[in-house]
Image (spheres, rainbow, N blue to C red):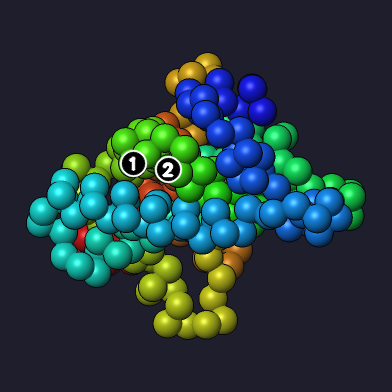
C-alpha cells in the first residue's frame, strides 16, 4: 500500500480506510471484513460532483445536453479503469481466490469501482481539497486531450448517436500505430463501420486520436460539426 500512496501522492492518516477501499467483495466474503462497496457508492457521488462543478464553471457556453455527455465521458467505467491502471491500483487490490484466478485484478469493472472507492477514502481521510486534487489530476488532463477549449463537441458520442439509428451497424476504434518516446507518444486510430474504415485520426492519447477519427468520419458523412 505504500507504493500506492506514493503513486497517488497522498498518505492516509487512517490506513483502515485505504485497506477498505482496496477490498473487493470476493475477499471480504472470505475474510469476513468490510468490502469497498459503500466507499464506491460515496466515491461515485463525489466524483460526479467534482466533474459537474468544474465543467459547469469552465464551459459557460456549453448547453446542458453536451455538459451531460462530457461528464459521462469523464466518469464512465472506460475512463476510470484507465485512471486506475495508471496508478497501479490493480496490483494493490485484495481479491478472493476465485476472483484472483479469473483475472479480476485487471477487470475493468473492478478497477473502476475501486477507483471510486479510493476517491471516497481520500475524501473521508483528508477532506474535500485532497479529494479534488486527486480527481483533477486525471480529469483536467482528459479535458485537455479532448481539446474542449477549441470545440465543445464530443465527436465520438455524436457519431455513435448517428450510427445507432441503424441497430445492425457496428462501430469500433482500432489502434493502428503509435510513435515517439513513452512520455510524448502520438497515437494513430481508425474508426470502422462494420469492416469499413470511415475515418482516421491522431493524437497525444488514444482518446484524442479516437475523437479526431470520429470528427473526420462525421465530416466525410456531411454532418455539420
The local crowd at label 2, few if under 14, some if 14 to 19, many if 20 or more residues have their Cα within 10 Å, is: many
Residue beneath the point at 33% across and 63% down: 69
Q: Which comes sooner in the sequence, label 2 or label 1? A: 2
Residue 201 % position (x, y)? 42, 44
Q: From the viewer's perspective, is residue 85 above or below residue 166? A: above
Q: Residue at x 79, y 47 (%)?
A: 95
Q: Give residue 178's position: percent from left, percent from top.
A: 55, 30
Residue 168's place in the image compared with 41, above or below, is below
Is mark 2 in CB contact (under 8 Å) with mark 1? yes
- Residue 190 seen in the figure: no
> Image quadrant for the N terminus?
top right
Mark 1: few, some, or many residues within 10 Å (few <14, many ≥20)? some
Q: Secondary structure at mark 2?
A: helix
**Residue at image location 68% in from the left, 54% down from the top:** 35
Please tell me how many numbered marks the rendered image carries: 2
Residue 17 in view, yes or no: yes
Q: Position of residue 10 (x, y in %)?
A: 48, 26
Image height of 85 relative to 108, above or below: above
Tell me the quarter of the image containing the C terminus: bottom left
Residue 16's quadrant in the figure? Answer: top right
User: Residue at image x 25%, y 61%?
Assistant: 67
Residue 66 x %, y %: 25, 63
The residue wearing badge 2 is: 123
161 relative position to 17: left or right: left
Q: Secondary structure at mark 1?
A: helix
Corner quadrant of residue 127:
top left
Q: Which of the pair 13/52 is nearer the observer? A: 13
Instruction: Kindly identify which numbered label has been placed on residue 128.
Output: 1
Amino acid at each position: 500500500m505504500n507504493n500506492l500512496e506514493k503513486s497517488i501522492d497522498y498518505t492516509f492518516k487512517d490506513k483502515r480506510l485505504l485497506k477498505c477501499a482496496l477490498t473487493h467483495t470476493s475477499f471480504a466474503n472470505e475474510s469476513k471484513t468490510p468490502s469497498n462497496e459503500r466507499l464506491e457508492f460515496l466515491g461515485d457521488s463525489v466524483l460526479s460532483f467534482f466533474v459537474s462543478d468544474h465543467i459547469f464553471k469552465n464551459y459557460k457556453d456549453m448547453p446542458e445536453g453536451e455538459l451531460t455527455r462530457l461528464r459521462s465521458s469523464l466518469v464512465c467505467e472506460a475512463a476510470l479503469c484507465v485512471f486506475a491502471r495508471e496508478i497501479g491500483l490493480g496490483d494493490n487490490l485484495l481479491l478472493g481466490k476465485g476472483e484472483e484466478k479469473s483475472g479480476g485484478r485487471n477487470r475493468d469493472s473492478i478497477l473502476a469501482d475501486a477507483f471510486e472507492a479510493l476517491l471516497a477514502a481520500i475524501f473521508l481521510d483528508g477532506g474535500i481539497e485532497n479529494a479534488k486534487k486527486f480527481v483533477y489530476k486525471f480529469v483536467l488532463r482528459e479535458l485537455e486531450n479532448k481539446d474542449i477549449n477549441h470545440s465543445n463537441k464530443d465527436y465520438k458520442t455524436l457519431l455513435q448517436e448517428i450510427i445507432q439509428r441503424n441497430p445492425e451497424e457496428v462501430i469500433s476504434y482500432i489502434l493502428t500505430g503509435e510513435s515517439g518516446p513513452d512520455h510524448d507518444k502520438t497515437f494513430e486510430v481508425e474508426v470502422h463501420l462494420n469492416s469499413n474504415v470511415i475515418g482516421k485520426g491522431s493524437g497525444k492519447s488514444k482518446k484524442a486520436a479516437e475523437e479526431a477519427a470520429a470528427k473526420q468520419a462525421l465530416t466525410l458523412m456531411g454532418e455539420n460539426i
